[in-house]
Amino acid sequence: MIFVNSEISALKKILIHFPDQGLSRVVPHKAQDWLFEDIVDLEIIKHKEYIYYIQLLLYFLDPQKIKNISQEKLENINFYNAQSDIFHNSSYVVEIEKLLLDILENDNIRSEMTAAIVAFEECPFIYLKEFKTYSIGQLAQTFITGISPKGLQFFPPIPNFIFTRDIGIVIHNFLVLNKPAKAARQREAIIMRFIFNYHEMFNEIRNNIIELDDLYPSFFSFTEDEETDIMTLEGGDVMMIHPEHVIIGISERTSSAAAKELANLLLNKCSIKKVTLLKIPAKRDFMHIDTIFTQVRKDFWVLFDEFAKHCPQFPVQATKLSLTNDNIHYATQIYQFQLGQPEPIYFDSIYSLLKDISITDFGCQHEPTIVFSGNKEYPFNSREQWTDSCNLLALKEGVVIGYDRNRYTIEAFKNNGFTIVHVEDILNDFKSGKLDPQNLENIFILMPSAELSRARGGFHCMSLPLQRQKI
């Protein structure tokens, strides 16, 4: 089943991608072109960080796949490799590469996809013949990493493929596909279009796949500002925040044209009654709205405090309005459209919007708790937002995972009643039976982050929920 109607109800199925060899091919002079700020250590990410993420997901989503697995097998990297004989092959913690392998079994799909990628990458025609000699596994690896079986780099890696949130978003039983803002992510979009349109997992929603290009022929536009016509959309800017309410960010990666077109579509087609458009500065510091805030419970949020205060509406130059430690904030524009109402409702800050969602949408009888990045202490608020203190993934309401390095933010959670536990400790408690994942409440699970955090994305970014329990 594919269905999501909140950000916080219990996860049932999720799409992820285990870090691949493309991450090891990022070089300094191309790092920013490929949307990286630093050179990461792939082996540490795989062996000492990301495997804990998958183990945790399996305990919550598919416990039968992990309960009786030996520690030796869990430490074997092949358990996480889609092409290995001992791959976990969970139907609930779904690996993209496994889906790609599945569809490449079909000769027609394999031929069509090969031609599409060769054309996009502007490869010599001889590559088509070369790729026909590859096994399905070799072809999948080349499509993802750009590396041939002989170790040649045929085309660039797509190191951002681990950030599966951006390739699509599930809204009820609809799947909205992205249109990347940056060339570095466009091969990801090609791969995922084939998977979403051909893999049997998505048969039930085949007629509910939304691609904005099909609906908005911007090349016929007569506007003078070409920027307003660009159609770009990434999943980190779309939040299925409530069964009747979607938030769409307008940011460095999602354009105003795409946000408005998606808003119209959701209100007219997808049983959505409210759409909030949230415009933030087009800055690398916060490329999507989920780097600024995420939801923890109906009445609990984490927020970057520089967006918490009332500030003038756009068009104010998208820069800091004050440089004093107590007064730093950024210009935003927030307008909410409601089905059947011709005029939008405006909010003066993200803080006000989040309070309204908790009280108006969810019916909370008290003021929500809003925890701030870095515990609102300068300069740790900015430092920890940079390492994704606000980019948390809710495994269920009140149970979130985030990086262990954001100490001040973690302290703020602790001060507000959350139990803080390291992932290795909680995995041991699950294995021994001391704890049951389904019975946890108000838990912040610390994930190792020395290398992963340098890739500039948290666990909200590294997750595409395909199914959550209906809220």
Image: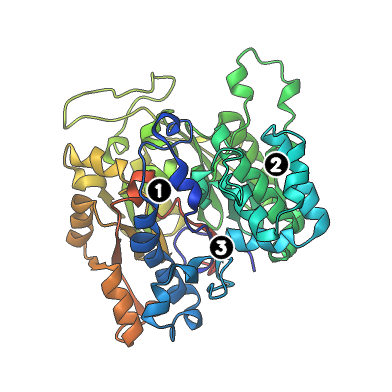
**Residue type, label 3:** Glu
Q: Name the residue under label 1.
A: 356
Which of discs 3 and 2 lies nearer the camera? The answer is 2
In contact (CB < 8 Å): disc 3 and disc 1: no
| Badge 3: residue crowd in 10 Å (few <14, some 14–19, many ≥20) | many
Distance between mark 1 and mark 2 Cα atoms: 45 Å
Hey, which residue is sitting farthest top in the picture?
Answer: 224
Hey, which residue is sitting farthest front in the picture?
Answer: 150
Q: Quadrant of the N terminus?
A: bottom right
Q: Name the residue under label 2.
A: 117
Which secondary structure lies at badge 2?
helix
Which secondary structure lies at badge 3?
strand
Distance between mark 3 and mark 1 Cα atoms: 36 Å
| Badge 1: residue crowd in 10 Å (few <14, some 14–19, many ≥20) | some
| Badge 2: residue crowd in 10 Å (few <14, some 14–19, many ≥20) | some
Which secondary structure lies at badge 1?
helix
In contact (CB < 8 Å): disc 3 and disc 2: no
Among numbered discs 3 and 2, the one appearing first in the sequence: 3
**Count of numbered tags:** 3
- Camera sees residue 104: yes
Q: Name the residue under label 3.
A: 95
Residue at (30% x, 39% y) in the render: 308
Asked if residue 293 is positioned above or below residue 298 in the image, the reply reads above
- Camera sees residue 364: no
Among numbered discs 3 and 1, the one appearing first in the sequence: 3
Asked if residue 281 is positioned above or below residue 424 in the image, the reply reads above
Among numbered discs 1 and 2, the one appearing first in the sequence: 2
**Residue type, label 1:** Asp
Which of discs 3 and 1 lies nearer the camera? The answer is 3
**Residue type, label 2:** Ile
Q: Where on the picture, by quarter, is residue 226? A: top right
Out of 63 and 334, give the one closest to the viewer. Answer: 63
